[in-house]
Amino acid sequence: MDQLHRLAPCYWGNMETTDCTLIIPVFDPPKADASALRSSISNGFAYSNPKGHDPLGRRATEPNLNITPRIVMKLHMDYLSAHSSFLRALFSGSNPLDLINTTLISSPASPPPPTRSSSPSPPSSPSPVTPMSPSEEPFLRRHAPPSSYHYPHLLPCSPRHPIVYLPVPDPSSIRLLIHYMYFGMTDYIEACLIRGDVKWDGLARNVEYLGIRGIRGWLAGWLERLDSDDDDFDVDFDQMDLDGDTDVEDDMTDVQGSPRGRDPSPRSLSKPASTDPIKLPT
């Protein structure tokens, strides 16, 4: 695994060495701006228009790929199989329906996180992968094609380069998880969570669906840290001094020490501290 992460810069976005393709349908897709599309293409991901040219060369009469917008990603099976038990089994020829049933039984749906009223500032460095804006409705509530398009399957292709039709619960966050599979880093996922570009529950559903075990602990820890940060911001407004009449000297008395043992009380500049008359030397 460590060796795969070290070699990730050599393979990330390298179209000449890819050996598989993922086609992810985007039902009821959000509007993506031009910068997001350019970022997707530069990172090896293509957001395809169903009315445009089909990169797979399929006929326009074949509806299973042209019925919805889709994300097309040319990737490497070694990285996908190393992290995703679902994709590893799919590449090995397992029945997709059996895989889905096993996933639903062993991985119950995760509850959505509580609504946050405030969040910490986002990191200054921009993310190299720009996900699409998440949809407000869950995957199962979207307007979707018939049920035959709801399960993953291998499309007719060369055995040397499998093409997988892969509906996922949350298409908006799938590219961040692919980046994690290559580099083993969560920095960009955290940045997008803080900015609100993706939702925690969408990431969690994708992780459970694809069987990506390595990031489960991080997702749980991130939510716990967010809860802890919110507790730190809780303030009892009844104890706040909102009119600005706080006596600063009283607050500082307990923390300000006496310099070199002298009396810290203020002295008058017009007379010495001692009441005895000053005797000049004769």
Image: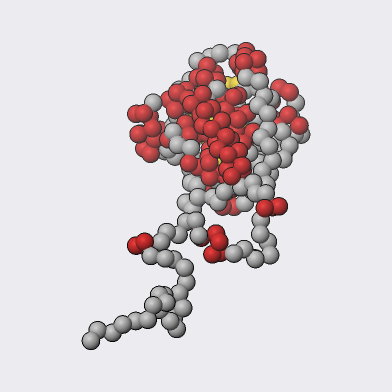
Residue 254 x, y percent position in the rendering: 49, 56
Q: Quadrant of the N terminus?
A: top left
The residue that appears at 40% across and 75% down in the rendered structure is 274
Residue 61 x, y percent position in the rendering: 69, 31
| Location of residue 182 by image quarter | top left
Outermost residue on the left side: it is 282
Q: Quadrant of the C terminus?
A: bottom left
Q: Does 227 appear above or below 156?
A: below
Image position of 147 (left or right of 154): right
Residue 106 x, y percent position in the rendering: 62, 15
Q: Of residues 177 and 157, which is closer to you in this image?
A: 177
Q: How is the image coloured?
A: secondary structure
Q: Does 209 appear above or below 135?
A: above
Residue 11 x, y percent position in the rendering: 40, 35
Query: Is residue 60 in sight in this rendering?
Result: no
Q: Does 108 appear above or below 257?
A: above
Total marks shown come to 0
Q: Of residues 269 and 58, which is closer to you in this image?
A: 269
| Location of residue 153 by image quarter | top right
The residue that appears at 58% across and 35% down in the rendered structure is 223
| Location of residue 68 by image quarter | top right
Image position of 255 (left or right of 97): left
Query: Is residue 106 in sight in this rendering?
Result: yes
Outermost residue on the bottom side: it is 282
Q: Of residues 121 and 240, which is closer to you in this image?
A: 240
